[in-house]
Every structure is written in structure tokens, then in C-alpha cells.
Image: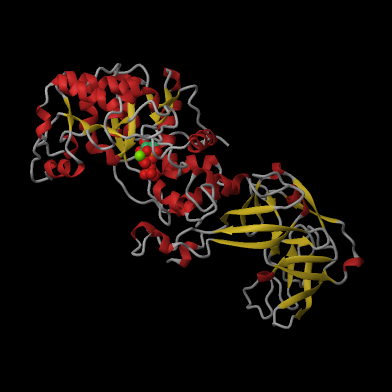
Amino acid sequence: MSDSPPSNDFIREIIAGDLASGKHATTITRFPPEPNGYLHIGHAKAICLSFGIARENAATGARCHLRFDDTNPEKEETEYVESIKEDVKWLGFNWGGHLYFASDYFQFFYDCAVHLIKQGLAYVDDDGVEEMRAKRGNVNTPGTRSEFAGRPVEENLDLFARMKAGEFRDGARVLRARIDMASPNMNLRDPVLYRIMHAHHHNTGDAWCIYPMYDFAHPLEDALEHITHSLCTLEFENHRPLYDWFIDHCPVPSKPRQIEFARLNLTYTVMSKRKLLQLVQEGKVSGWDDPRLPTISGMRRRGYPAAAIREFCKRIGITKFSGTTDVALLEYEVRDFLNRGAPRRMAVLDPVRVVLENWSAEPLPHAVVSNHPQNPDMGEREVPMGGVVFIEREDFMEDPPKKFFRLGPDRCVRLRGGHIIRCSGYDKDADGNVSLIRAEILPGTVGMDAPEGVACKAAIHWVDAATAVDAEVRLYDRLFTVEDPDAAEGGFVSVLNPDSLKTVTAKVEPSLADAAPGFCCQFERVGYFVADSKDHRPGEKPVFNRTVALKDSWAKKSG
Ligand code: ATP
Ligand code: MG
């Protein structure tokens, strides 16, 4: 299924303008994740934007780099690098050979810092964290410059070299830019460029014990890669003057432009990697790819089509206004894609047995059921049929109201693709639950209208008892019970939904047992399901995840 045409937004307009005016011959964007967690749906928005723009401008030679922002040695792991690559690819994008690691530029950052020192624009400060904070001032009070700012260039060069050589302990000194201690923009009050950290780095090992700050490194990375448009989220808006200052004062080969857009927030979701990591580490979920998490890998395992995620990102658009998007919109897109493309199958989640008492009178080895009611191209399949079938417990009522068009004493209903049946009686167990339903088939009603005098308005799903397979079905629901878990008084963990996962043993048609992991379908009248990519073993142990229910039940529940 191909994507709908790209929508326009202020960033695409700026880029189109730069191409039209000849300011740039092409556009080069980048997606710069820090490899300290798995990607989430918020990242998908940034990916669809930067990789999408590159694709739309491919005719001019546009491209989008995947750059791991791995300048912080402490939190990064190669597991994250691999998962991020996989997620970007799965979303349908590629970096075409432009895969970079910020840590490969450590020498360049260092050279830029030395350049700033030589220009008198950076100095080594011995003030500790507390003193630096005290002298920084606040929005109303200008800061005061450290007494160490007066060091001559030679002394700064010497101290910085010795910082690099490992002569000092962590936190003993920092390198700062000399900008403006009175600036109303706090980011410009002599920001720290380098700190001492005797830490092992996944890429550079123990080669470095000083590490650059994000604000310093990021513009240099962009410039080094000749990024034309560096797209990031709004929280970096008041870092832009600093971004531009570094570009203006360092010996960089190009002049990238930073443009900010609103980040994605979703209801009933937490998105910060730190919080997702906490849920994983505390075992609140089964891992980063738990189908309840807003991670790309969780959504993939949940059965969300990549195209639906792309369409969702397009629909929410790119603006400067931050807000929170209703997660129901994402679920709507998923449902919309699956409704069009997912084949239909039959599975009974809460089975009760129906004995067709006159079965032998008209044997029918199988029913022929359409694979998609609106799409005849998807064909039909044979579903085994016998004298005992399972139907959904809720499709039978002992004392149904008039408007209940399913099964009840003396009532008729059609078994999808098969006969109309009439209920002739039922048994109950010791607990008072219906344990068995007796019914007769109305001969000659397969594919036919109900005969004169027979009221039959509905068809229900069913499975033949003799050939049905037991499947583990995981009914996933929202992970949190409130719209804004971050605002919960007791913290987001206090509002976890205790019913976010219910597991049932369903009776499913035999073909489902052989489905390949990742196979998506609609369980007719129930919802969309996917064969779990990790635990489902074809022919041995079928495991299905509920991707999304047929209808949004939360709209009612919470309304
Ligand atoms: P988090 O805040 O979830 O921990 P992050 O911003 O620290 O995420 P990065 O790895 O630094 O994660 O993000 C890589 C890119 O993805 C950045 O350019 C960032 O702006 C963008 N991004 C992160 N979260 C969102 C979001 N919710 N919506 C849109 N873009 C996002
Ligand atoms: Mg970040």
C-alpha cells in the first residue's frame, strides 16, 4: 500500500524556498538519536520528518544521515545502536551509507575548542559546580564571570591539554566559552564546552577522559556533515543562539541552520526514555519491545503496520505549537490500515460449545468463508465444519431482549459462511454458567436467505470443535489508566493499568496455528491480531497479540 502524498508545513516551505533561491542546491538532514534507549513514536515523528524531506527531494540529491549522538560515555550501549538501525529501516527509511557516530569527531571537537582558546573565546575554569551555579545569576540578575576567566591563552592551552592528558580528577576543571555572563539567554552565560570524565566509551575506549557537552558538539557535528537543515524539537529553541555562535566562531566547513518543531506527546503514554527504561528495569513490562510500550519495537510486535505509523505522523503534521495528541488517533490509523489489508479469520476467545443435533442429517465437511468481505480479490477459504462448534459466550443469552439478534432459546443466527441454526435448549453447570447449547441446523440455508418465517439478522463467528486449536491470546490494553500519567500525583508508575494485559486461551481455526510469526489478521468481530514475533511457534504453540480492538472502547469508558 503506498503512502498518501506528503503534506506541507513551515519547514518544508523553508527548504523549498532555500532550493528555489539557490541558497542550497540540495537539502541534507539528519536524525541524531542518543543510543541510550529504544526509539519511540516521538522519534518516529522526527524520523518521518527528516528522512521524509530527504526522500521528497531525492531528485536534487537530498539525503538524511543517521548519526548516533554518542558523546556521553556513560549511558550508551551497542544494543541500542542495533535496535535503532532496525527501527529506522522497519519504518521504511534508509540512510544510504550515511551512518555516522559523533564520537568519531572527538578530535575535531577538541581542535575547535583549542581554536576558541586561541581566539580568547574559551577558558579553563576551576570553579566547582556550586560556585559556577552561584555566579551564573538568574533571569533577573546578570551573572558574574569566574576569576579564572582572566587566564592568559597560553595557560588555558596548557591546562586544557593536561585535562585531556588525564592529569585531573573528574569535575576538577571545565572548559567554558567566553560569551556573555549578562545575556538574558542563560545558555549564553559562558556555557561549559568540556568536562572531565574518566569513563570508558563504547567506541573510543579509554582514549578520552574529557567529553564535549551536547550544545557544543551538536552544531559541529552538523557542520562537519554539511547538514543544511538541522531539525529538532522546540526545547532547543533557546539554544539556537548558542548553536549559531559555535558555527560562527569555530573553523567549520559549512553553515547548517537549526529549525525547531513541536515534539509529539500522546495521551495515556509516557515517552521519555528515562521513564521507559524504568518500566523495563522494574519489570513493569516484559522488555523494550513489550507491545504496550510506545516504542517502535513494541508497536511492531503489537502488529502496528509501519505505514500506519507514517500516516499518523503525516496527519498530526509539523508545527511550532506543542500539544498532546489523542492516542485514539494513532489507533484509528492502525485500524484503518488493517481494516483494508488484513485477512479475516475466525477465533473464539470465550468459547461455549454448541451441539448441532441434526448434524448428521446434512453433513458438510467445511464452510467456505470469505477472506475479506469488501475485497473479493483476497479470496475465500475452507473452514472445517462438524457437529459441534464453539461460539463466543456473549453471543448467547438465556433471556435475550428483542434487539439481541444473536442466539437465545428458539432464536436463530447464522454461523458465518455456514448454516442458519436455531437454539433448541441449553445446559448449565453447577455455578449457573451455560455449559452447552443445543441447536439444529436449518437445512439448505448455506449462502441462502432465511426461509419464510425465520428471523435471522446476524452472522456470528465460530470454530469447529473437532479441529479447533488452542491458542494463547494476549489482550493488550492501554498501559496507563489516565490521560496524562506524567502528571499523576503518585508518579507515572502509580497509574499503571492493572488490566493492560489479559491472557486467554482461545479456540482458533486450524490454519492460524500454522501462521508465520508477524502474520496479521482480523479475528472476525473481535479485533486485529498478530502472531507474536517472539513466542509464537507455528504448528506447536500459537500465540497471538491483540493489535487493536475493532472499536475504541475507551471513548465510552472514559467519557
Ligand atoms: P527522550 O526525551 O524521549 O528521552 P531524547 O530527545 O532525549 O528523547 P534523542 O535520542 O536525543 O532522544 O532524540 C533524537 C531525536 O528525536 C532528536 O532530534 C529529538 O528532537 C527527536 N525526538 C525525541 N523525542 C521526540 C518527540 N516526542 N517528538 C518528536 N521528536 C522527538
Ligand atoms: Mg536528547
Closer to us: 311 or 516: 516
Residue 532 visible in this rendered orientation of the protein = yes
User: Where does ligand 1 appear, by image quarter?
Assistant: top left
277 left or right of 416 in image: left
Q: Nearer the viewer, residue 250 or 396?
A: 250
User: At which x and y percent is residue 356?
Assistant: 83, 69
Asked if residue 501 is positioned above or below residue 79 in the image, the reply reads: below
Q: Is residue 314 in sight in this rendering?
A: no
Name the quadrant containing residue 180.
top left
- Residue that appears at 65% across and 58% down: 473
Which residue ends up furthest to the right in the rendered image? 361
Relative depth, front residue between 40 and 312:
40
Residue 492 vs 27, above or below: the answer is below
The quadrant the C terminus occupies is bottom left
Q: Taking 198 as reference, is 467 above or below it? A: below
Colour basis:
secondary structure
Task: Return the x and y of residue 480 as percentages of the image width and height.
Answer: 45, 60
Q: Position of residue 8 (x, y in %)?
A: 37, 34
Name of the residue lying farthest toward the front: 167
Residue in the image at 11% along x and 35% along y: 146
Residue that appears at 74% across and 81% down:
428
Q: Residue at x 75, y 76 (%)?
A: 435
Residue in the foreground of this view, choosing between 169 and 19 = 169
Tell me where residue 149 sits by quadrant: top left
Q: Residue 386 location in percent, x, y?
A: 85, 62
- Quarter of the image where the N terminus is located: top right
